[in-house]
C-alpha cells in the first residue's frame, strides 16, 4: 500500500468507525452496511448510500449528506480520499507529473524551448561558463498510472495535499459530530447520578430506609 493510499485508508476507517458509533445511538445492532459513505454523484433512491446511513440519527445523517463531494467546494478533498482508496484496490498510485520552476542567472539572456518530454534552455555561447541554473521542485503530483488513460488523468493530487486531507477529517469532519456524543454522555451521567427518594420502593419491592440519628 502506498503512502497516499495508507493516509486515505486511515481516514476512511476513522470515519466508518465514527458512523458505527453514531448508529449505536439509535440501536444496539447497526446493520452491516453502516459506514460513512462518500459519493461523487448524488445517490439514487436504490443506492447503497441510504443503507449505510439508515441507523444513523437523522440530524447526523443530514450532516453526512452536506459533506458529500458532489456538492463540491472544499468537500472535494473527501472525494480525493475515496478516489485514492479505489485506485489502490486495483493499481499503484503513480507519479502523474512533477511541477518545477527554473531560474537562469549569470547570463544576459536565455531562451526556452519546450519539447514533448524535455525543456531546452539556450544562452549565449560566450557566457555559458557564467550560467547559474536554479531548479526548484515545489510539488510532486500523483494520479492514475499513465498507461491507464490516453488523455489527461481525471484524478491528480499533490504530495502536500496529504496534510490537507488529514486536517479536513481531524478538525472539520469529526468535530462536527461531537454534540451527538456529548448529549449521550450527559444523559448517561444523569441516569447514573439519579438518587431514589427516601421511602420509595426499588424494582425488587424493597424499601429505602431513612438514616436514624443515634
Image (spheres, helix red, strand yellow):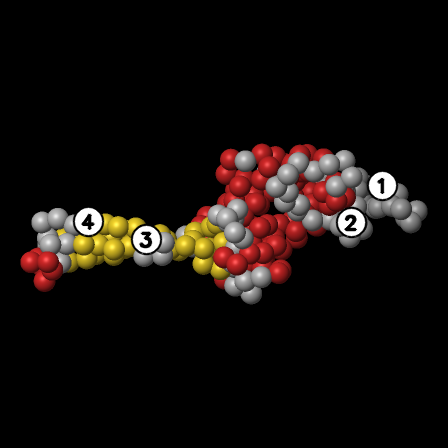
* Residue, disc 1: 199
Quadrant that contains the N terminus: bottom right
- From the viewer's perspective, tell me whether residue 100 is left or right of residue 130: right
Dot 1 lies on which element?
Answer: loop
Dot 3 lies on which element?
Answer: loop
Residue 43 lies, with reference to residue 19, above or below; the image says above
Dot 2 lies on which element?
Answer: loop
Q: CA distance from mark 1 to mark 3?
A: 93 Å
Decide if residue 86 is in sight here: yes
Looking at the image, tell me whether mark 2 or mark 1 is earlier in sequence order.
Answer: 2
| Relative image position of residue 13 (x, y in whole percent) | 62, 55
- Nearest the eye: 105 or 212: 105
Looking at the image, tell me whether mark 1 or mark 3 is earlier in sequence order.
Answer: 3
- From the viewer's perspective, tell me whether residue 130 is left or right of residue 213: left
Q: CA distance from mark 2 to mark 1?
A: 41 Å
* Residue, disc 3: 115
* Residue, disc 4: 111
Q: Quadrant of residue 52?
A: top right
Amino acid at each position: 500500500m502506498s503512502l497516499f493510499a495508507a493516509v486515505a485508508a486511515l481516514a476512511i476507517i476513522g470515519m466508518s468507525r465514527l458512523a458505527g458509533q453514531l448508529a449505536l445511538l439509535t440501536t444496539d445492532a447497526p446493520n452491516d452496511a453502516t459506514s460513512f459513505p462518500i459519493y461523487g454523484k448524488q445517490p439514487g433512491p436504490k443506492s447503497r448510500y441510504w443503507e449505510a446511513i439508515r441507523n444513523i440519527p437523522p440530524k447526523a445523517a443530514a450532516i453526512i449528506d452536506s459533506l458529500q463531494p458532489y456538492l463540491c467546494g472544499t468537500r472535494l478533498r473527501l472525494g480525493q480520499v475515496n478516489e485514492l482508496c479505489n485506485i489502490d484496490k486495483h493499481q499503484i498510485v503513480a507519479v502523474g507529473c512533477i511541477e518545477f520552476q527554473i531560474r537562469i542567472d549569470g547570463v544576459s539572456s536565455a531562451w526556452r524551448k519546450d519539447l514533448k518530454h524535455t525543456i531546452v534552455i539556450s544562452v549565449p555561447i560566450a557566457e555559458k561558463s557564467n550560467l547559474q541554473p536554479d531548479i526548484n521542485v515545489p510539488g510532486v503530483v500523483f494520479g492514475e498510472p499513465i498507461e491507464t488513460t490516453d488523455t489527461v488523468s481525471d484524478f491528480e493530487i499533490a504530495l502536500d495535499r496529504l496534510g490537507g486531507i488529514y486536517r479536513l477529517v481531524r478538525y472539520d469532519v469529526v468535530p462536527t459530530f461531537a454534540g451527538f456524543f456529548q448529549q449521550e454522555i450527559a444523559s448517561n451521567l444523569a441516569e447514573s447520578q439519579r438518587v431514589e427518594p427516601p421511602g420509595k420502593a426499588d424494582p425488587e419491592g424493597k424499601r429505602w430506609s431513612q438514616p436514624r440519628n443515634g
